[in-house]
Image (spheres, rainbow, N blue to C red):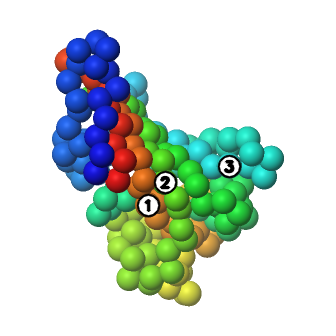
Amino acid sequence: MDTKNLAELYELPTLDWAAIQTTLDANIPQAPDTGGPNRHTYWLSTIDPDGSPHVTALGALWIDGAFWFSTGARTRKARNLARDPRCAISIATHDFDLTVNGTAAQVTDSAAVADVAARYAADGWPAKVDDTGLALTAEYSAPSAGPPPWHVYRITVETAMALGTVEPGGATRWRF
């Protein structure tokens, strides 16, 4: 991993990726009143056919060094990722703002899909694996996810950038 301090100009320290990862590993809650200002929201950016950005909020999980999320096949984000898997995901936490760039791929491993369903269910969304074993279903989802089934995607991290939001601050980029 290559680390670059983006705040040397201000003589601020390099942020520690291990501390960022520890926060992500603890499963950042997205329910109301669990983050700032009232909750944490993940934002996914994909590339529209004309090259312009498409940004949408979604529920994401950090599992084994990657971000995972689900969406319906007919959603704009799914269509964009099928055409061009490059994307970015970001979140603001109390201690840092984080943006991760990478590539997303639809998950076709039934055990991994089942694990994601169980994690979502443990967080309060009653997701379960559908009859195919390769997608999720539930009584409800975010309107932006489209109708079920919802396919699971994994973002392979290529670069990450964090901005420290508490003292002493700082800004750091990592290339994986």
| Residue occupying image coordinates x 44% and y 76% | 113
Residue 140 seen in render: no
Q: Where is residue 143 drawn, in percent x and y?
A: 64, 52
Q: Distance between the residues labelled 2 and 1?
A: 5 Å
Q: Residue furthest toward the top?
A: 10
Residue 39 versus residue 167: which sits nearer the camera? 167
- Secondary element under disc 1, as helix, strand or loop, is strand
Q: Where is residue 130 drawn, in percent x and y?
A: 53, 81
10 Å crowding of disc 1: few (<14), some (14-19), many (20+): some
Mark drawn on residue 102: 2
| Amino acid bearing label 1 | Thr
Going by the image, does 71 lie left or right of 59? right
For residue 77, which quarter of the picture?
A: bottom right
- Asked if 106 appears above or below 62 in the picture, the reply is below
Q: Where is residue 92 drawn, in percent x and y?
A: 39, 33
- Secondary element under disc 3, as helix, strand or loop, is strand
Going by the image, does 98 lie left or right of 148? left
Asked whether the residues under the numbered discs 2 and 1 touch, taking CB atoms below 8 Å apart as contact, a structural biologist would say yes
- Asked if 47 appears above or below 75 in the picture, the reply is above
- Secondary element under disc 2, as helix, strand or loop, is strand
Residue annotated with mark 3: 47
Q: Distance between the residues labelled 3 and 1?
A: 16 Å
User: If you read the primary sequence from the N terminus, does the residue marked by circle 2 or circle 1 appear first?
Assistant: 2
Residue annotated with mark 1: 156
| Residue occupying image coordinates x 53% and y 61% | 104
| Residue occupying image coordinates x 31% and y 59% | 65
